[in-house]
Image (tube, helix red, strand yellow):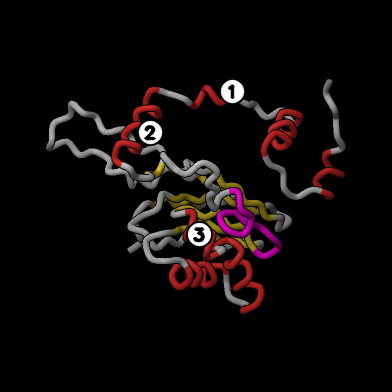
Amino acid sequence: MVIQRDVELFLVSHIYLAFDGAEAFAREQGVETLDPSHFITPENIERLKQAIEANRVQIDYTPPIQKDVKKETPVADGDSQIGTVGCVAVDSHGNLAAATSTGGFVNKMVGRIGDTPIIGAGTYANSFCAVSATGRGEAIIRATIARDVAAVMEYKGLSLKDAADYVIQECAPKGTAGLVAVSATGEVTMPFNTTGMFRACATEDGYSEIGIWPSV
């Protein structure tokens, strides 16, 4: 049995969905889904095995160490920052949206929740700005990074850039976080306090920016 809902009414009365209800709603809206077994690959199994043997938690999507590679060949050390994919957007009416998908951790405790699904930590949008964060989830949760950017804009009257710089440099521990953000007026900023952060932006007038390392 398929139940059709009035999406507009639903979105007015509901803000947050999770687990089976979220998946059912996604399917109703035509979003393609895959069985969880799709994500169980030989590489993932080997990655988990190595993390368990080393008794450590590591960022997901770190390539498994190849046992037969030569010593002079560089290999990942478990700290590869390529798991999170986030985006923010503003339309011509100033409506803002943010979305974040995480790579997560390998060998984490059962039940661990990172910053990505926590509104105000890794993801947030209101009438002032939209923010998507990346980095160490626990640090981002403690600092409520995404919400704080909007709060500093609202209560201190700072620009998006100044607000985001303050939160990243003063509130988040060094080496733990970065973010992408856009304001209702189209201002864009992408600060981070790590060695680098993969980032890009584009505007309807043709401007684009792509970067990894700090701007000179």
Residue flagged by tag 3: what amino acid is it? Ile
Q: Left or right of 94: which side holds 156? A: left
Q: Residue at x 24, y 29 (%)?
A: 66
Residue 75 in percent (x, y) is at 23, 38
In front: label 2 or label 3? 2
Residue annotated with mark 2:
48
Q: Secondary structure at mark 1?
A: loop
Q: Earlier in the sequence, mark 1 or mark 3?
A: 1
In front: label 1 or label 2? 2
Q: Earlier in the sequence, mark 2 or mark 3?
A: 2
Residue annotated with mark 3:
140
Residue flagged by tag 1: what amino acid is it? Asp
Residue 172 in percent (x, y) is at 46, 66
Q: For the residues labelled 1 and 2, say whether their Cβ atoms are less than 8 Å apart.
A: no
Q: Quadrant of residue 154?
A: bottom right
Q: Counting other residues with Cα less than 10 Å from the Cα at mark 3, is it few (<14), some (14-19), or many (20 or more)?
A: many
Residue flagged by tag 2: what amino acid is it? Leu
Estimate the spatial distance between the alpha carbons at disc 1 and disc 2, rounded to whole Å.
20 Å
Q: Secondary structure at mark 2?
A: helix
Q: Nearer the viewer, residue 50 or 144?
A: 50
